[in-house]
């Protein structure tokens, strides 16, 4: 009614000012840190019998924005997504207002057609010349689950009806640096995490396959990673494709993060061989800035595998006596029922900046990562973990007090303690956000991620200056 | 940059005018039907090398809105969600601008705390006096998958590591009218659709359990439905709880649709016994109008079952040496990695209208359904399929030409053909949208769903008048 309308009219300028303009302004803070206890008090979380007046709700909107991390800020480097694209944001505002669900053409005509157009273009870019099929999913983890499910269905179609208890023990392979969602997928889909074999080097794939076959297990897929989460490393896809062909294994490429490089003629060699994959997961919400979520799962198959594997043919939704071509009702390919129109914002952005614009962004981000890596080499107290392959720049900061210490367990124990303290200080200051983590036997190091075209060389210099200034006393 | 900023400033009035005000105006059309072929031409779907100028992109926004179905329109009755709540919409605009991902407190403090507050309140309303745990998921289908996974993990914790091939055959029970996602869950999680036993009446549960145990299968859960998709019927939860307790079965209640009735002191008897469930799925984006998606999955368990069952402990995300209490980093309870802040919009709406406001909406929708059912009984040519228990009002329209025909196969064959034609005509006219489907051995009937407080008695009268006017010549 009129009251709701006036609320919406009052709220919009606040959203635009606080959550859009200020949230992306480099002169503003990235975050306004409060401890959980403090923030609970500030937000007054309790849900009560009575409602609140508009001025109070508007203040709650301001508070929610104020204490949120500004992921679109030029100095948010903490995750594998960043920045704010205005076209994508407009696309998202449109879809939130329209509130569609993508089961049938009848209720989501525009959003199903734009999804299909985006998928076909992504499939073309992967290099599947005969085409393919796909679906947008709520996250790369779910895309990887789709991969496991279609791979096992491809090998044993009975699994859908009979379940795994009627089959030999299925086993899958993955590269060592794979995303943790592969383990989650194995657990959730009933494969079991013990049946995921992590293979450190390609040559041993073959030996493993054979020994497993001998003990009655059925290897069915290899998960390769194009752009690992921490290091941004790329598996050798051609070699993995050779092995998969030789042993009749489904080849899935988790390119959720690294898929962005496919947009660049200069850098797509990193994914050389991806066209030989049976399935690919690729999240345009990461390197291509389409906004969360935007996650494509695609298969090279042309035999309606997604539909056959996932369909349940609900008669109340997928009626066969409709007046239009029901092959456009693609919802039954999905494991979801209600599904958000995650492709539309990407389609609108792509229309606005073109394939060329996406390419330029990716190349700029990679050039910026290269600049940062070279700066790190030049500066005292900074040490690269490895030469970056992608835009993950991983490095240690060594405070002056440790620079003369001999390399060894004690040195690394000390270095390990540096990043958490620097991170705490930067968050309390709100000056920037960058992630850190240990990795294998390596002590905590920073992982700087570069994505947004808003990020400048000055931001790279700022990052290093800031880490030094926050950690030099340690 | 400045260009993106000016685009955003130009686009916002279009979004508000076309996708908000007009899209909810009863005087405007619900949909502007185009066939897939026509719409492909109109939208110019192709993604090209070069980008397009702003006036063209603004026109694409207008077109996308124009040809989309207006699900917030007062005469959209087609699905189990409808209407537009201004507070929820503001919440969604905020979260789209902020673009958070809910893995850690570090990057999503406000959204993790509001999620927790909403879950605790929903758990209180379910009636779990000792509390419980929960997570928001991307759809009721995924919530039901969570239920299957925690239920089997509860019975056989080894399943996570060893997989189903190391266990006896797991079987689950469900009521006959359950959502099709239960079959999807059984297929996806490796249980197999054949291992889902559909039980028509409670008494036979017990016999089935015994006979299955004798043959080496392991029954582990019952899925009960509170508010079925088509008829809006409620399973007898107390009786099912008795059976589950007797046979040590996990009791899951799919209250995705019917959960809304819990907000009403007058109608919550429909879910009498839900406090005895082990897990509940409840989607506030349906009856409570929180906007897609908003889907809570909750467990009565207090032993960190969600975490134990789903965690993969990624060391790059869930570092244990952070400076704050990492028990607030709840992302590892989820099967997702990136996860949208679906609870926030609901929290904001709840703050604005209060528990009382939610209750009034639910009671108003149920009263409106009662009004419609009584109108149907009064009118020639309309016949109820059953007395509505909830806001699903299911009915046949019998055109004058069939009213004198004797009940029998030929009559029903004719009636079956009516709804698809009426639906085609209403969509081409754009006057309203209501679903139809066959059901079991019943011929196609309309399923009218009432949700939004914007819907009036005049809209109910309009619905019946319109169906008659569109179908009277058939």
Image: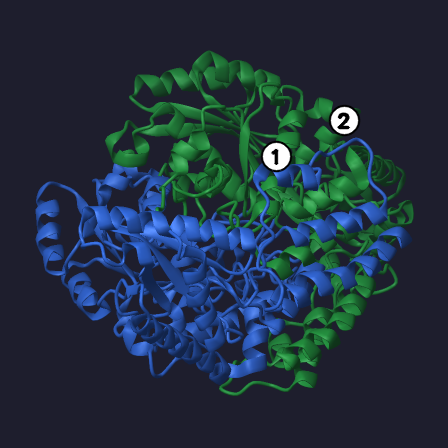
Chain colours: A green, B blue
Q: Position of residue B68 (x, y in %)?
A: 61, 52
Q: In the rendering, at what x and y percent does residue A93 appear?
A: 69, 58
Chain containing the residue with disc 2: A
Residue located beneath label 1 in the image: A119
Residue B26 vertical placement versus A276 (above, below)? below
Write down the quadrant of residue A453 in the picture. top right
Q: Which residue is mark 2?
A: A267
Q: Chain of mark 1?
A: A
Label 2 environment density (alpha carbons within 10 Å; few <14, some 14–19, many ≥20) = some
Closest to the observer, B263 or B168: B263
User: Quick one: SS at disc 2?
Assistant: loop
Across and down, in percent, residue B224 comes to 27, 60
- Residue drawn 61% across and 49% down? A293
Q: Nearer the viewer, mark 2 or mark 1?
A: 1
Are discs 2 and 1 both within one chain? yes
Q: Is residue A250 above or below residue B37?
A: above
Q: Locate the C terminus of chain A and report the quarter of the image it occupies.
A: bottom right
Is residue B213 rendered to the left or right of residue B17? left
Mark 2 or 1, nearer chain start: 1
């Amino acid at each position: 009614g009129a009251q709701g309308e006036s609320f919406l009219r009052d709220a919009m300028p606040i959203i635009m000012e606080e959550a859009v303009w200020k949230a992306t302004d480099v002169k503003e803070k990235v975050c306004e840190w409060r401890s959980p206890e403090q923030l609970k008090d500030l937000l007054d979380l309790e849900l009560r019998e009575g409602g609140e007046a508009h001025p109070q709700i508007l203040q709650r909107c301001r508070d929610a924005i104020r204490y949120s991390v500004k992921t679109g800020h030029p100095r948010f480097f903490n995750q594998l997504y960043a920045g704010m694209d205005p076209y994508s944001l407009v696309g998202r505002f449109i879809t939130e207002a329209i509130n569609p669900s993508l089961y049938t053409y009848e209720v989501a005509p525009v959003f199903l057609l734009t999804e299909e157009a985006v998928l076909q273009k992504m499939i073309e870019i992967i290099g599947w010349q005969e085409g393919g099929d796909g679906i947008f999913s709520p996250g790369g983890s779910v895309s990887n689950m789709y991969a496991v499910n279609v791979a096992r269905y491809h090998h044993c179609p009975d699994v859908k009806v009979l379940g795994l208890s009627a089959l030999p023990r299925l086993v899958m392979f993955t590269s060592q640096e794979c995303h943790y969602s592969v383990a989650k997928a194995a657990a959730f889909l009933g494969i079991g995490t013990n049946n995921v074999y992590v293979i450190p080097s390609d040559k041993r794939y073959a030996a493993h396959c054979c020994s497993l076959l001998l003990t009655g297990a059925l290897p069915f897929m290899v998960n390769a990673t194009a752009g690992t989460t921490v290091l941004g490393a790329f598996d050798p896809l051609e070699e993995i494709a050779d092995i998969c062909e030789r042993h009749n294994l489904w080849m899935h490429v988790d390119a959720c993060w690294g898929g962005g490089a496919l947009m660049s003629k200069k850098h797509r060699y990193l994914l050389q061989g991806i066209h030989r994959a049976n399935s690919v997961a690729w999240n345009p919400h990461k390197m291509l800035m389409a906004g969360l979520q935007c996650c494509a799962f695609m298969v090279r198959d042309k035999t309606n595998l997604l539909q056959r594997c996932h369909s349940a043919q609900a008669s109340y939704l997928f009626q066969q006596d409709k007046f239009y071509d029901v092959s456009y009702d693609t919802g039954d390919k999905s494991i979801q029922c209600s599904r958000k129109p995650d492709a539309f914002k990407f389609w609108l952005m792509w229309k606005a900046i073109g394939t060329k614009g996406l390419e330029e962004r990716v190349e700029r981000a990679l050039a910026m990562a290269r600049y940062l890596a070279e700066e790190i080499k030049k500066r005292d107290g900074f040490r690269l973990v490895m030469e970056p392959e992608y835009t993950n720049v991983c490095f240690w900061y060594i405070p002056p007090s440790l620079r003369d210490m001999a390399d060894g367990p004690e040195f690394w124990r000390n270095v390990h303690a540096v990043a958490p303290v620097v991170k705490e200080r930067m968050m309390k200051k709100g000056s920037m956000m960058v992630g850190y983590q240990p990795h294998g036997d390596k002590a905590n190091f920073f992982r700087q991620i570069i994505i947004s075209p808003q990020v400048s060389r000055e931001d790279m210099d700022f990052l290093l200056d800031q880490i030094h200034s926050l950690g030099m006393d340690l």
